[in-house]
Structure formats: structure tokens, C-alpha cells
């Protein structure tokens, strides 16, 4: 039994919906379900009654919920006290635009973590780890990036990318019928451009080159209105609200995934850094190994020999 499983239990108990709880926790729905089942096995009781339409607490779940909340509060108090007593140097963590929502809770017992205020693109954050400017970073990396920079990586998150379109149709759209934007500003969009070029080459999505920073924001929505095809949204725009004249459409054949890695130096030996790496371990594949899932050939987590998406 792990504290994060208890936090997952509380989230599902409050939402009474696995999908909403997974969105709140920023984890994949199947992973959340697996963790709740593992907790039920460890406790020896069923916490939820589930069917296709509803989720409800069992009597055991209702009885254990206040005790779980109290236990989590005591754990948080313990971590805060330990942090105050610790005189060690904080572990410096950089990121692009996504972090695990329970980062503080999962790392507090391992080390004091300082989240760096400089939010940069993936290739920049990976390079900062390699040159010692950061101890860890959450970013997108390719296998050859890890080799070139002398880094190790662990999967800690994944986004299933969707398309944004005009009209009222919110149904599935095949990847070959979408477009993907590439920006001339390679300083800011090097990682996304590499991903998008491989996506277009392997799935048949139409590559559109832009020079106005329109990968996200209002300029992105303007491209959608002009393009005539649904345009695949980047990870930086995943949570952005859509204008009322645009809709979100799931991309299929294949399903498109973007992975988030925690990276650290291959020669790292400091216990505090390695303890944070272990604390952020993510169980499950986050949907990326599904039968119709697509990852670039350069992705460290692509199954060996996979040919999906071609």
C-alpha cells in the first residue's frame, strides 16, 4: 500500500467517477483503475461498487475514507517537518509545461525539490540537466538525445493528442485526414517539429509549415479555421479552452501519444536525486502500448519492432 494509492482512493471517492478522477489527477484512466484494484487487494476489502453507469462507495469504503484523509494529513505534516529539518541542497527540477499533480506529495519524503522558474522547451531542459544546470527535468526526449547528452530517462506521463476542428462533428478522425503544424522558430519548437515531422511521415497527416508561433494560442485557432482539416493539438495546448466555434475530435488509426520523461545524468550518484527519481516512478504504460497507439520510432518507450502507424 502506497500513499499515492490512498490519494487516488480519496479522489475517486470525491468524484465518484473514474474518468473525472483521472483527469483531476492527470493520470490515465486504466492506470487509476489498476491502482485502486491493487489497493483493494492490499486492504482485503472492496472500496467501490462499479458498473457501466455509476460508481459508489461500499460500506467499507465509506468507513475507511475519513481515516484515509486523516492519514494523508499526518503524512503531509511529517513531510513538511522533515523538509524544515533538512539542511541538504534542494534537488533542482525543470519542466516544460506539465508536472505530476502530486509531485510535492510524492517527493517530500525523498528530498527537498525546488521547481525551477525557468520554463523552457524540452531540448533546452534536457541540455540543462546534461550540463549541470538542473538535476532533473520533465520533458520529451528521443533515444538519441539520451545517448548524445549522457542521460537516463523514466516514463512519468503521457498525453493522448486530439485534433481541433471547425463545425459540429466531434467524432473520431483518422490521423491521415488531419494536419500538423511545424513552426520555423526551431529555438522554441525543435522537439515538437521533430515529433510532428515523424508523425506526418508515418501516419499520412498533412504537414503545414507556419512562422507565426501558431502552435498554440489564438494563432493556432486561426490556423484551424483556415486549414480545412482538423489540426492536431500540441501538448502545450492540451488544457486550453476552445473557442465556441471549434470542437475537439479524437484522433484514431492510430491514436497519437506524446510521452513525458523524467531525465537525469547517467553518472548521477547523489542519493537525494535518485530518491526523487524513485518517488516519481509511474506504474503502467499510460495507454501508450495499446493496439492502436502511435509513438515516434525515436521514442524511448516505443515497443521494439513496432510498426504501428505506418
Image (cartoon, rainbow, N blue to C red):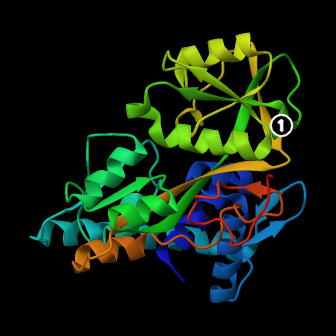
Viewer-closest of 155 and 60: 155
Viewer-closest of 187 and 22: 187
Give the x, y percent position of residue 66: 54, 68
The residue sitting at 13% across, 66% down in the picture is 89
Is residue 73 something that shows in the picture? no
Quarter of the figure with the N terminus: bottom right
Left or right for 222, reference 167: left
Tell me where residue 285 sits by quadrant.
Answer: bottom right
Secondary structure at badge 1 equals helix
Give the vertical position of 46 relative to 9 (above or below).
below
Give the x, y percent position of residue 162: 72, 38
The residue sitting at 69% across, 70% down in the picture is 303
Give the x, y percent position of residue 15: 67, 52
The residue sitting at 27% across, 60% down in the picture is 130
Viewer-closest of 74 and 219: 219
Numbered disc total: 1
Please name the residue that numbered disc 1 is placed on: 176
Viewer-closest of 29 and 145: 145
Give the vertical position of 206 relative to 123 (above or below).
above
Tell me where residue 180 sits by quadrant.
Answer: top right
The residue sitting at 69% across, 86% down in the picture is 41
Left or right for 116, reference 261: left
Amino acid at each position: 500500500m502506497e500513499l499515492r494509492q490512498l490519494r487516488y482512493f480519496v479522489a475517486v471517492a470525491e468524484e465518484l467517477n473514474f474518468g473525472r478522477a483521472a483527469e483531476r489527477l492527470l493520470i490515465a484512466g486504466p492506470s487509476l483503475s489498476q491502482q485502486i484494484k491493487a489497493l483493494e487487494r492490499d486492504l482485503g476489502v472492496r472500496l467501490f461498487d462499479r458498473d457501466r453507469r455509476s460508481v459508489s462507495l461500499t460500506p467499507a469504503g465509506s468507513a475507511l475514507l475519513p481515516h484515509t484523509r486523516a492519514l494523508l494529513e499526518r503524512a503531509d505534516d511529517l513531510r513538511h517537518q522533515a523538509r524544515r529539518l533538512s539542511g541538504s541542497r534542494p534537488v533542482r527540477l525543470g519542466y516544460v509545461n506539465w508536472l505530476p499533480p502530486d509531485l510535492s506529495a510524492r517527493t517530500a519524503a525523498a528530498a527537498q525539490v525546488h521547481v525551477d522558474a525557468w520554463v523552457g522547451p524540452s531540448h533546452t531542459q534536457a541540455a540543462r540537466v546534461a550540463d549541470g544546470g538542473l538535476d532533473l527535468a520533465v520533458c520529451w526526449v528521443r533515444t538519441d538525445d539520451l545517448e548524445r547528452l549522457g542521460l537516463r530517462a523514466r516514463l512519468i506521463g503521457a498525453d493522448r493528442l486530439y485534433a481541433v476542428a471547425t463545425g459540429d462533428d466531434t467524432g473520431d478522425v483518422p490521423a491521415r485526414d488531419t494536419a500538423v503544424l511545424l513552426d520555423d522558430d526551431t529555438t522554441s519548437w525543435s522537439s515538437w517539429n521533430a515529433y510532428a515531422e515523424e508523425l506526418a511521415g508515418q501516419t499520412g497527416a498533412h504537414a503545414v509549415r507556419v512562422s507565426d508561433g501558431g502552435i498554440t494560442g489564438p494563432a493556432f485557432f486561426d490556423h484551424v479555421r483556415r486549414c480545412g482539416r482538423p489540426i492536431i493539438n500540441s501538448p502545450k495546448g492540451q488544457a486550453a479552452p476552445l473557442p465556441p466555434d471549434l470542437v475537439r475530435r479524437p484522433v484514431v488509426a492510430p491514436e497519437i501519444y506524446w510521452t513525458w520523461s523524467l531525465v537525469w545524468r547517467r553518472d548521477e550518484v547523489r542519493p537525494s536525486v535518485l530518491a526523487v527519481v524513485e518517488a516519481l516512478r509511474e506504474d503502467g504504460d499510460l495507454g501508450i502500448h495499446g493496439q492502436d497507439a502511435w509513438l515516434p520510432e525515436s521514442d524511448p518507450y516505443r515497443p521494439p519492432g513496432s510498426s504501428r502507424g505506418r
